[in-house]
Image (cartoon, rainbow, N blue to C red):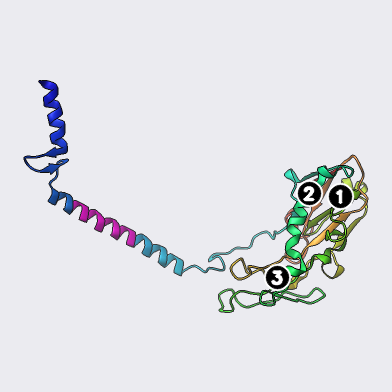
Amino acid sequence: DKKKEEEAERKKTLWDPETREFIGRTRERWLKISVFYVIFYTFLSGILIGTIQVLLMTLSAYKPKYQDRIVPSGLSFLPYATNFDIIFKKDDPSSYEAYVESLKKFIEQYNDEKQTDDRKFEDCGAIPKSYTERGELDSNVGQRKSCRFSRSELQGCSGEIDTTFGFKEGKPCLIVKLNRIREEDKGKIGEIKYFGFAGRGGFPLQYYPYYGKMLHPNYLQPLVGVKFTNLTMNKELKVECRVYGGGYEKDSRHGGDAFFGKVNY
């Protein structure tokens, strides 16, 4: 009947015992087309790999091929705070626990015992100096040594004496690049103490330039601790942080990649 004829035709489409064809092709034709596509895709893959290798030969592993002057940046802020809002009550440890843990986790890499390997670290002096060149990026010098920076330089913001970084006293510490207060909140912020390299609230140039993760894998950037010693309670205080120095335009919008934060307690 008709159904059996259709079924037989479908089977014949897959395998024809008379011509010995599978899906319309004999074994020899399947072999030829398979060999063709293997050679074809191997050729395409070779072109792609060759193109990538030629491109990689023109690039440096240590610096971009094309560079342009960019706005200086690098401003960092700790502890981590959602939307830069730091909200806590000094009598409630749970309200500032996350901030303290964020500071502890970050500052651990600055422990003295983690900087004892003379193959990776070096002393860069006790006072600020100028830039320290450590060879060209494409030279065969290999990995560069990193300047030691002890957390003890941060004194009252080191977390060594006060493990809550001042939060339990209502005198919180922030670890930032540099700090400048917005005019409208100056009277509410009170005294601010800065702790940094050699007792100064700045960043010694001998820690720069940074050579990247491949050549400077153990790099420790210098820090400045900022301690707010007399904040106005129960107020939202706005703080603006900036970096100033050579290469930064004074009193400009881009004077050190400013960021704003809020402190509530």
Q: Nearer the viewer, residue 176 or 66?
A: 176
Q: Is residue 200 magenta?
A: no
Q: Which residues are magenta?
A: 33-46
Q: Nearer the viewer, residue 105 or 185?
A: 105
Residue at 78% from the left image edge and 61% from the top image edge = 244
Q: Is residue 60 left or right of residue 38?
A: right
- Determine which residue is flagged by label 1: 167
Q: Secondary structure at mark 3?
A: loop
Horizontal and vertical percent for residue 19? 7, 42
Instruction: Please name the amino acid that badge 2 sits on.
Output: Tyr
Vertically, is 5 above or below 175?
Answer: above
Which residue is the extreme one toward the left?
18
Horizontal and vertical percent for residue 212? 62, 66
Image quadrant where residue 46 sits: bottom left
Measured Cα–Cα span from mark 3 to mark 1: 32 Å
- Determine which residue is flagged by label 3: 208
Which quarter of the image is occupied by the C terminus? Answer: top right
Circle 2 residues within 10 Å: few <14, some 14–19, many ≥20: many
Measured Cα–Cα span from mark 3 to mark 2: 29 Å
Residue at 10% from the left image edge and 20% from the top image edge = 1
Instruction: Please name the amino acid that badge 1 sits on.
Output: Phe
Q: Earlier in the sequence, mark 1 or mark 2?
A: 2
Q: Earlier in the sequence, mark 3 or mark 2?
A: 2
Q: Nearer the viewer, residue 129 or 11?
A: 11
Instruction: Please name the amino acid that badge 3 sits on.
Output: Tyr
Residues under numbered marks 3 and 2 in contact, where contact means CB atoms less than 8 Å apart: no
Q: Secondary structure at mark 2?
A: helix
Residue at 69% from the left image edge and 74% from the top image edge = 117
Closest to the camera, between mark 3 and mark 2, is 2
